[in-house]
Image (spheres, rainbow, N blue to C red):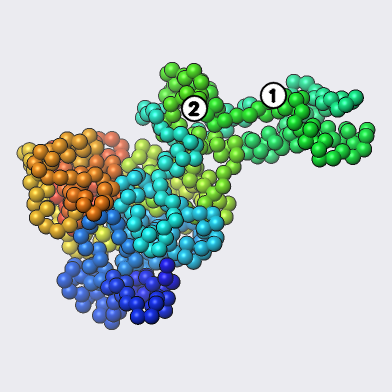
Amino acid sequence: LPRYKTCGGGIIGPSRDALPPGFELPLKDRVPDARRGAGAASGPGAACETGTATGGLLAAEIERPRVGPMRDIAATIQPEQDDLVRAPLSASLCVQGAPGTGKTAVGLHRAAYLLYTHPRRVQRGGLLILGPNRAFLAYVSEVLPALGERDVRQTTVDEEVARTVGHEPRAEDTDAAAAVKHDARMAAVLHRALYARVAPPAGELAVPDGAYRWRVPADELAALVAEVRAEAPPYLVGRERLRSRVVRALRARAERRAGPVGAAWERRAGRSRPVAALLDACWPRATPEQVLAEVLADPRDPVLTGAERAAIRWARPPRSYRSARWTAADLVLLDELAAALERPAGYGHIVVDEAQDLSPMQCRAVARRTAASGSLTVLGDLAQGTAPWAARDWREQLAHLGRPDARVTALTAGYRVPGAVVELANRLLAALPVDVPPARSVRRDGEVTVRAVDVLEAAVVDAVRAALAREGSVGVVVADAAYGRTREVLAAAGVPAGHPGEVAADAPRVTVVPAGLAKGLEYDHVILAEPAAVAGGDPRGLSRLYVALTRAVSRLDVLHAWPLPPELRAE
């Protein structure tokens, strides 16, 4: 990867002195003449505000048709984004970014920058990219390879957890059960359930050694158990630590009577049946599956209410924890227990996108994967929080992520979403339960149409055909429940439609997108069908609608047969 260099207007890209002789930068990486300024731009650039941070080059990059995966966007990095990209490796950052402000660009370029600037330190621990879903990861998958970085793991939190615990989700929780399992209190519930196994000995320890029998009284053994327990090591480390101290007590008795003993004697004593029996009684072996199965079969922890205990209790406990069918939330709990048993190794740096939608327990899973000297780049937008447990405050979320003092920076200048789209979407902000600055767009272009229609399905087909007459990608965003039906309607009309995240060269220009998967995606032309159905009337519905409205790069058609949500109506 060529050396990074700050260029005029904040654009970053390879510096010329790092390039081979005779190599010419592609147009997108050339530095615009700062003396011209954005005001001298013509064509697409004329739609941007004046100023050194924007201009013809930036506008041309932003307004190029969105076909295929997300591109290398080095040419559109702006000064305020560049400062975040180049932050020290040791610094953990949180970027609160309104739609289209480039927070994903910041995270991906920061990953490439750190890998290039600190190759040994970062590669030694590894670098992990965590996205919200597979569709998003497919869309951004080519950015890092285009920047010269191919050996970076890109996955979701749920997939990373499933890989670690060795299970796939094979069951589904009720909404009530999922809410309890993702609550931060479950960490304490699981910890207490695990360490409830630790108990003082029932009697003395007697270990035969030839003609002698070395004895350790019960009160001394109880003190050793309490001592190790107070040190709070990982559970399996504690078991071995207790073994070591019991052997030390036996050795002291043997040496007082017969002189020094060797390492072989200590190994025999540690593996003796009486010591093994003591450990099994005082600090028994455990597996994450065994502990979680016991909790879910009969939850008793008083930190949970009666209703919460009933919500997570298995209706029909399996015959054995080995045959249990785990849910996605269960896998996060298994991951918590696995870390309590034995501390895992961490990554040198983690970039986590759409972090506002992580539950407290998912945040803890991310935090465990950060090495002691590692750092995080946290990207998200509180206004786009659509999960039932979505964060409403970054400080609280960063505490769950193990970085309560991380620097929080707000990006409000939007480069992707046109001003007309931003103006419409901003109407929803006052009704959202978060405090974020409104987005503003540097682009004064964009087409927005809001139309009441009699027959929604026919109107969607007509809108798609009209959009296909113009250049670029087309995203049809619908309520999740309408996804299958909308695909059927378009297929019957002879309009091929792809799936979210489909980036093959021969993929259809039209993609039907359930609103629940729209986050992070972008299309030249977005047709939003039935905003009231997307909002859905649930507490996070307006946030989901806010996401859906802000996927358009050039044009937005809003079609509705039902009345618009009150928050979206013009005053």
> Regarding mark 1 in the picture, which secondary structure is present there?
helix
Q: Which mark is residue 427?
A: none
Badge 2: residue crowd in 10 Å (few <14, some 14–19, many ≥20): some
Q: Position of residue 400 (x, y in %)?
A: 49, 44
Q: Nearer the viewer, residue 320 or 554?
A: 320
Residue at image x 41%, y 50%? 154
Q: Let me know if residue 571 appears in the view.
A: no
Q: Amino acid at mark 2?
A: Leu
Q: Position of residue 288 (x, y in %)?
A: 54, 31
Do residues under tags 2 and 1 come within 8 Å of each other at their CB atoms?
A: no
Q: Quadrant of residue 85?
A: bottom left
> Regarding mark 2 in the picture, which secondary structure is present there?
loop
Where, quadrant-wise, is the N terminus in this rendering?
bottom left
**Number of labelled discs?**
2
Q: Quadrant of residue 421?
A: bottom left
Residue at image x 88%, y 26%? 210
Q: Is residue 13 above or below residue 455?
A: below
Taking the image as shown, residue 386 lies to the left or right of residue 5, namely: left
Q: Position of residue 212 (x, y in %)?
A: 89, 25
Q: Quadrant of residue 479?
A: top left
**Mark pair 2, 1: CA separation:** 28 Å
Taking the image as shown, residue 134 lies to the left or right of residue 211, namely: left
Residue at image x 26%, y 46%? 500
Q: Is residue 500 above or below residue 186?
A: below
Residue at image x 47%, y 19%? 318
Q: Badge 1 is on which residue?
A: 281
Q: Which mark is residue 304?
A: 2
Q: Nearer the viewer, residue 149 or 433?
A: 149
